[in-house]
Amino acid sequence: MADELPVTRFESEIVDLVKKHDVVVIIGETGSGKTTQISQILHRAHFTASGMIAITQPRRVAAVSVARRVASEMNVRLGEEVGYSIRFEDRTSDKTQIKYLTDGCLLRELLSDSELKQYSVIILDEAHERSLNTDVLLGLLKRLAGRKCPDLKIVITSATLDGEKFSSFFSGCPVMKIPGKLFPVEVLYSTEQPINYIESAVQTALEIHTQEGPGDILLFLTGKDEIDKAIKKLEDRIRLLEEGSCMDAVILPLHASLEPELQVRVFAPSPTTCRRIIVATNIAETSLTVDGVVFVIDPGVVKQHQYSPATGMYSLVVVQISRVQATQRAGRAGRTRPGKCYRLYTETMFENELAAVTVPEIQRSSLTSAVLHLKSLDLKEVNVLEFEFLDPPSRASLEDALQQLFIIDAIREDGSITSLGKRMAVLPLEPSLSRALLAAEEASCLNEALTIAAMLSCESLFVANSKKSSSNKRDLEFKNLPDGKGLGDHIQLLQIYEEWREDGFRAEWCEQHGVKTRSMMFARDIRKQLSQIIQWESKGSSRYKQKGPDLVALRKSLCIGFSNRLAHRMQRHNGYRTLGTKSQLVQVHPSACSMEVDDDGLLPEWVVYNELVNTGRPYIRNVCAVEGSWCQPALKKLSSLSVNKLGGTQSNSGQRAKQEEKETVQTEKAGLEKPSAVQ
Ligand code: ADP
Ligand code: MG
């Protein structure tokens, strides 16, 4: 089957091109074999003789799924010749020659191997997705290409036709276009905008199922909740269809948090006797190809993270897809034979309201991690503010990142990275959490902080809709940490882990308490890995307390780490005001565990939080009670920053212009805006 893929037909052309040039761009329709075949082609051409082939993926699920597929195509055991590496999970060995890894993992590898010496070829795959990490890698690889590493080959693959843009970024490198074998796809528009796109999508799927010939249906929705809802509706209604009136249907979900066993079902060959209805997130748009799809239902929406540097807030919002995405989605219907794409929006809307292309993630994300990364690479001749990106992020978001890094001690006022900052960059965590771990190490409560970091790193800990989880989340007994009750989510996470540990890490405990066993096992594993990284790094100097944990020291450490995310309670009610250059009125997220209140029913005066999210209204999530006195150093730094701001870095108002110019010259050298006023 593999040798029928379009990419495979161009094997010798691909090999010749990569031999001749340091950087090559390969464009091919999704499903043409770029992800699974190019690595094998280059392996067969013996590129692996001088190092591994790395293939980056923006999504963890894709890295795992594709590595598994390639291992089976090559008839080798996963983790041997073909392996993968994603955050907290490395399945590679000395034998590994083809390594699928997330773009974030490759970025981290650059910290210890700045010239990527263990690789012969780096394939930056799915470049059209324009993930933040891929964009940073593009900039870094451009610097490496040819100049520093004459033997390193770089291949950039993309599904859409922005090959010229990548090529001109890499000084006009050759672009190879693999002709696709896409069958015609008939596009059908809605005559009016549906009021409820889930309902409309379910209806459309039923109509196709009862009226059209064989062929699987791929339905795009924005997230797991929507997918579950649609599947329930579909199941209920298909059950009501008269037996024998149409073929059987199998309804399958596909999203990033799907357990691996269930993902496999989507890739299993489709049975001829029944129709599969695959209800997927955007993951099926380009990164994973499901065979057998003939009908695509596209409601025209996607869930996107949007970060506002002006408020420091993340929103997860459902937005309209771009025309490029709509085209990609439609293309999924024409892979094996002519297909149909049902757009649940009008043609006028497609033409007039959809943006032409998707805004790259770098222009809608917090850049704190990315900037810390660039700083720790010590790109001597480069100022972060001037780093060459394919599409530059806004200056406001770069400045926001620099300010946050300054507050958490990762960079100095002149913009240079501190030794703490260097250590933070090595940890596979968000900078504030890394900072908290380092503070905890210093305060001899690393053990507990590691547990918290691990627990925060696993998504979805509590079993959804479990009565137990909600009651237990609020009423856990805190047997082990009698003083921990009411101090917030971090301490509660520690408590949950401790109870589970004391119980002997048993699955039964998780079931009884409404937490997911898989997540807890994952947390245990992450904890071990983090502990190895940090101890290896500090040469094993950390001490552990044998007695009960010192919760004050622990919360102080969290306060230091999250000092860029402090909030102060209102005087008379339980609203909080976030502190920083951009103050916000927020509420504690309803998912938070119950916190101690005083006689007037008021919550702790000071808290730090992990996230500021906008889900209808602004909420702070994962909150820890701290003391006002612990916040002083951060408040001092913050006030110096706002003084700086008054000093005019961002405004271009006339009187300030001159001073600004002077300051900018000084600060840009280091890459930090306005350090001069910082004491
Ligand atoms: P591209 O990267 O160009 O979009 P891929 O290499 O991902 O193409 O896919 C090529 C073919 O391999 C497709 O027919 C796809 O269905 C199949 N394939 C990819 N991954 C898997 C998998 N995990 N299981 C089964 N088939 C797969
Ligand atoms: Mg691909």
Image (tube, grey):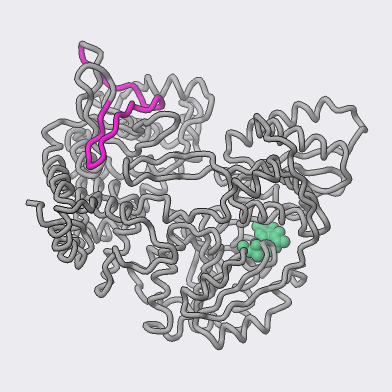
**Farthest front residue in view:** 654
Q: Nearer the viewer, residue 334 or 436?
A: 334
Given residues 394 and 417, the one toward you in this image is: 394
Report the quarter where the N terminus lies.
bottom right
| Left or right position of 295 against 52 | right
Q: Residue at x 54, y 25 (%)?
A: 465
Give the residue at the far top of this rendering.
599
**Quarter where residue 35 is shown:** bottom right
Q: Position of residue 640 (x, y in %)?
A: 12, 46
For the stretch drawn in magenta, the main secondary structure is loop
Tell me if 239 is positioned left or right of 148 in this view.
right
Magenta span includes 583: yes
Could you tell me if residue 362 is visible in this image?
yes
Q: Nearer the viewer, residue 7 or 158?
A: 158
Total tally of numbered discs in the picture = 0
Residue 146 in the image, given as x and y percentages of width and height? 42, 84
Q: Nearer the viewer, residue 595 or 389?
A: 389
Task: Specify start and end residues of the magenta stretch as a single range.
Answer: 576-599
**As drawn, 658 above or below 180:** above
Above or below, comparing residue 615 to residue 43 in the picture: above
Q: Is residue 459 magenta?
A: no
